[in-house]
Amino acid sequence: MSKKEYIYATGKRKSSIARVNIIPGTGKITINKKDMNEVYNLDTLKAIILRPFKVANLMEKYDVIATVTGGGFAGQAGAVAHGISKALATTDPDTRAVLKRHGLLTRDSRVKERRKYGLKKARKAPQFSKR
């Protein structure tokens, strides 16, 4: 990593967008100017964010500074993980291959289906009455 001391990437999931900077460091993760443990209480969401580092065997080698907007907790965690994966992929071709094999570089394109008229939700119909 010459010239620049950080790597920038954008991650997306559902309606969340994460702008992620990774810097060589000690493994500190900051999301929206707060520590990751302060933002996310659930261990499952923390595991989603840390998965790219575990898969690539780079735990505690990079610091992460992320800004996330839109969506809920799960979507934001997925967006941060996607951004981290994309940033790590630019560091080394071997790391990119490992991340790609685990499906971490592919954007999860699943979004909420729109509501249709005559229905209560996207597919839920009102109760049928014969009489």
Image (spheres, rainbow, N blue to C red):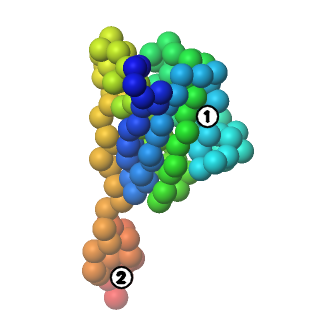
Classify 13 as above or below 47.
Answer: below
Q: State the residue lying farthest toward the front.
A: 3
Q: Residue drawn at (34%, 55%), measured in percent from left and top?
A: 111
Classify 36 as above or below 4.
Answer: below
Residue bearing the label numbered 1: 29
Q: Residue drawn at (40%, 25%), measured in percent from left and top?
A: 3
Measured as percent of width and height from the top left, residue 128 is found at 35, 78
Measured as percent of width and height from the top left, residue 82 is found at 40, 37
Q: Residue drawn at (32%, 49%), measured in percent from left and top?
A: 110
Tell me if residue 85 can be seen.
Answer: no
- Locate the N terminus by quadrant: top left
65, 51: nearer the viewer = 65
In this picture, residue 41 sits left or right of residue 119: right
Tell me if residue 63 can be seen.
Answer: yes
Q: Earlier in the sequence, mark 2 or mark 1?
A: 1
Say which amino acid is labelled 1. Answer: Ile
Mark 2 is surrounded, within 10 Å at the Cα level, by few (under 14), some (14 to 19) or many (20 or more) other residues, namely: few
In this picture, residue 77 sits left or right of residue 105: right
Residue 51's disc is none
For label 2, the SS is: loop
In this picture, residue 37 sits left or right of residue 29: right
In this picture, residue 97 sits left or right of residue 69: left
Say which amino acid is labelled 2. Answer: Ser
Residue bearing the label numbered 2: 129
Q: Residue drawn at (30%, 34%), measured in percent from left and top?
A: 106
122, 98: nearer the viewer = 98
119, 105: nearer the viewer = 105
